[in-house]
Image (cartoon, rainbow, N blue to C red):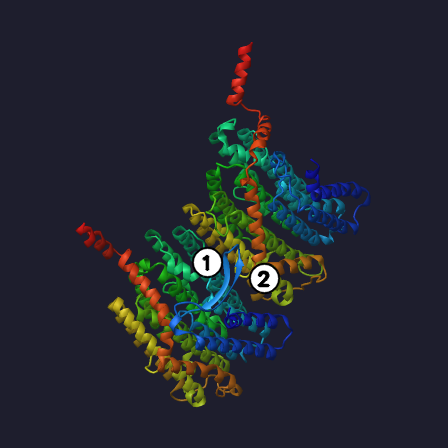
Amino acid sequence: MHWLLLIAVVQPALAAIAVGLLPLSRGQSRAVALGSSLVSLVLTVILCLKFDPQAAARAQFVWAVDWFGEGGVRFALGVDGLSLWLLPLSTLLTVVAVLSSWESIRDGARGFYALLLLLETGMLGVFAALDIVLFYVFFEFTLIPLFFIIGIWGGPERRFAAVKFLIYTFAGSVLTAAGLLYVLVAHYNEHGTWTFDIATLVYQTTIPTEAQMLLFLALFAGFAIKVPVFPFHTWLPLAHVEAPTAGSVLLAGVLLKLGTYGFVRFSLPLVPGACHEAFPWVATLAVIGVLYGALTAMAQEDIKRLVAYSSISHMGFCVLGLFSLNHQGIAGGVLQMVNHGLATGALFAIVGMLYDRYHTRMIADYSGMARIMPRLAVLTMVVVLASIGLPGLNGFVGEVLILLGAFKASWVAAMLATAGIVLGAYYMLTLMQRAFFGEVREPLAGEHAESAGDLRWHELAALIPIVAACFWIGLWPRFFVERMAPAIDVIVNRSTQVSRNESTSKVIRLVRRAPSPEARGS
Amino acid sequence: MVDLFLYLTPELLIILLASAAYVVAAWLGPARLWPWWALVTLACAAGALAVVSGMEGPEDTAAAAVRAVSYDSFAVTLRWLALASGLAIVAMAWYRAELATAGEYYASLVLLVAGLGLVAAANDLVLLFASLELISIPTYVLLYMERRDLEAREAAAKYFYLSVLASALFLFGAALAYGVTGSTNFRAMHELLLDPDRLSTSVPSLGPMAIGLLLAGVGFKMAAVPFHFYAGDVYQGTSNVMAAALSWFPKAAGLVAAVRVLVFALPGLEREVAWLSWVIAVATMTLGNTMALLQTNVRRLMAFSGVAHAGYMLVGLGAASLQAPPGAWFRGVDSLVLYLVSYALMTIGFFAVVELFGQNPGGRRIESIDDFAGLGQQAPLPAALATVLLISLIGLPFTLGFWGKLSVFYAAIATRDARYVVLAVIGLLNAAIGAFYYLRIIAYMYLRSGYGRVEYRAASPTFAVVVITAALTLLLGIWPRPVAQLAYRSATAVQGAFARQIPEHTRRHDVRRQVSTRPFRPTAVQAAVGAGHAAEY
């Protein structure tokens, strides 16, 4: 039994209960939130350092007890190569979220920080769950705190945004629930035993060919809405724009990854045949997402909307990488989840910092901010460069891996996606040029003069770790990739095995219809 | 016979004390004493139940096998649940002592508990029918008592006529079941149907009709489509306390009766039960949820929400009738027990929240969902507790409602029957629709600003009900193991009771004694005997 992981996951929820129930002031509750999220951050970093790269295919730091039913559902936590890096991403971005609401959340701070910490437990739980029901429990649970965070502390359209967000994602994920329940039955039909262990279910169950596509679609319904894959993205710009800064940071940084994580954890190993068959469709949607997101981002006048649409574009990249079903593509996809989380989380935090100072998010209102806030400008530049994939920073590694993988699977898709990178560089650098360079023009100068200084300690503390992580991944990617590689090999092996033996793709079916050498011999 | 009455002491005690109250109330009139009297009655019943719950029927003799009551832990679990929910209802109704008919009012309330307890214990069609009526008849009285306006009178009349019709349907179904098997005892019916040679008439002809009529009878109690249409008007036209009682006692009784009769007592007819439950479940869930979407009156909304929940329960009922393969985590009956526990907590708890704000004449009452506006700021604690209950009603994690829905849908999928897999998907989509109208209430509480004054008595029994139900919903949602084990044990007990063979040497004699009372055409043996007699003359 390893307690570290359990403490990292459960401790924020306990802190949330304390913050929610005790009569703390605003300063006290944010201090508790910061302390609790720092504890989880330290614990997850320790886990990453202690993680054994050789055994990355299996869950480590396992903690499990029986939870529900007779010999049924367990409360089982653990980390393997696929989930390893998502844990420190979640804890780091929670710290960022706490720090970026340091001054901006004034009303109902207690409730806000309690919900933020509950959300952290939910996110960590999804990535650490080893039991299929536990996974779903946390997957759904994340909706509740985020609903309130958007709905109570959000912008003018917050009510509509919160309800749409919850209903949209809940409707998708109930289909995922049906799919996951079906997996239990499929496992029983094959092996004659009931189990809820994710690893056993996904790696040892052969889904019948005729059911693969249906199961794929059921899982896709929930995960694609979370990502979001075009055309299921309509909830996202609304939710992002209306959410308070902390909500946007966690929504873009972590919660979108629940979808891609679901793909790599369940869809790819469970229904490899259907994934092969669906690749043209998924790749098409992913590429449309990449281009559509980028083009729409170019047209935005509101920085927050721009970042929201760029998320759609970048998440399309992740999906393309994952579904190319080869080692590079999946590794790139998993790494890009972390990269996108860091970059977009930081960008949303930066938008929040600008908004706190000038109460506007229009690009046109800003100019020459680099003169007024040089520290912010430097950090923003690094994050933007990371986001557009400059070599030496993290985005480059992920994008190269994804493009390598995608090229193997379909060169057309890879080519079109590359166009998305170019567009990404264009709108991001234009944003920098318009808002940070050029002649100095403060929006509403005079009215908010007192708050227009450069970054304060809590803002620096929010951005510097992210920038450091961007450099770390960009300069030493091996450290990250080698810890996930064995887990990805398992998926790739399963997928190639299946495509060799049981693929439902038409070409292979035609080939298989021809008599095999053995048959001819006999 | 003595042990049978001993076993039913809790319910008999309630009936005796209630009857006494009806008499005394004629002289005493309204008095502060009555709620206390109800409390004492339930406490006595609880004490009696604690004593007899460990009782085991004389299982090894054949006489016990065909007893009118069953001694399994399924019955005991539900009797406890009935008592606990009765306590909650009495607590909600604590301030009704000034009613002119207070004595009759509280006596009728506790009779509902006795009715549900007897339904849970009944092992015989006759006792089951009588127990179901023991729930219906006090309900008619109660519906007339609290409110005397036109709306309430319409509600009471509507409920009365439809309920009588449903009772007639149930009775007709029971008569047909008796006609098929020649027995009214569930165990004996089970035995006889497994050995069709001894049946007096062919099962295929009458069996499905019996199933259909019995399901219609319990369908009314559960407010399942197409017997649901009283629900909206009746709930809206009555008080919050009565709406809570209506949404729980008849529904639970209907479901428990359905489990005993349709799942276990009539083997060989599983296909019909599964088909009918499938159709009714789809209609009930879908109609309940879509109608609830359109409501603004909170009791009417909860009426249709109750219809939708009856649909989820029917999913479990159908799944229970199709036996899932062994080793399955949840196989139907256990999921229903779990669902009932979660439903009792969340529905009674939510009505208690609504009632809580109606108790103070100064503050604003909650009639329409608009009245929830701003409660998050105006009454933070009740609003937070109501949110827990609503999240449970949606079926989101870390509440007991999540586990209830999960186990019901899992049971459906675990049957490995293609229809039920589809049914689970339909049910899950319905859960998503349902999310919307519960969420709207949460959104009103937290995302809108309130108006007027909000008052509630934090020291009232009603508030205690809110706190306890919400806390249990949450705690059992985080750590569901105890209630899962309870459900599992109860289901295994009732399955075991029917699976256990009646000992061979006594079985023939006793079953025949049961069978010999049948009214229909003689069996081959009797015909032969009769022919022999005829030949003598």
Residue B198 position in % (x across, y down): 51, 28
| Residue found 45% across the figure and 82% down from its top | A465
In the image, residue B270 lies at what x, y percent? 48, 39
Callout in the foreground (1, 2): 1
Question: What separation in Å lies between label 1 and label 2 (alpha carbons)?
Answer: 30 Å
Where, by quadrant of the figure, is residue A202 drawn?
Answer: bottom left
Tell me the chain of label 2.
Answer: B
Amino acid type, callout 2: Thr
Most distant residue in the top direction: B537
Q: Quadrant of residue B154?
A: top right
Helix, strand or loop at mark 1: loop
Asked if residue A436 is positioned above or below residue A179 in the image, the reply reads below
Q: Which residue is mark 2?
A: B387
- Residue B157 numbered tag: none
Residue A430 visible in rendering:
no
Left or right of A361 in this view: A507: left
Q: Position of residue B342 (x, y in %)?
A: 58, 54
Left or right relative to B459: residue A134: left
Can you give x and y, in whole percent of width and height, for residue B224 in the image? 54, 44
Return the residue nearer the eye: B398 or B248: B398
Query: Which residue sits furthest left?
Result: A521
User: Viewer-proximal residue, B68 or B309?
Assistant: B68
- For label 2, the SS is helix
Q: Nearer the viewer, residue A493 or B93?
A: A493
Residue furthest to the right: B27
Q: Amino acid at mark 1?
A: Phe
Q: Given the current orientation, which residue lies at the most extreme bottom position?
A: A371
Label 1 packing within 10 angstroms: few (<14), some (14-19), many (20+): many
Which numbered dot is residue A196?
1
Chain label for disc 1: A
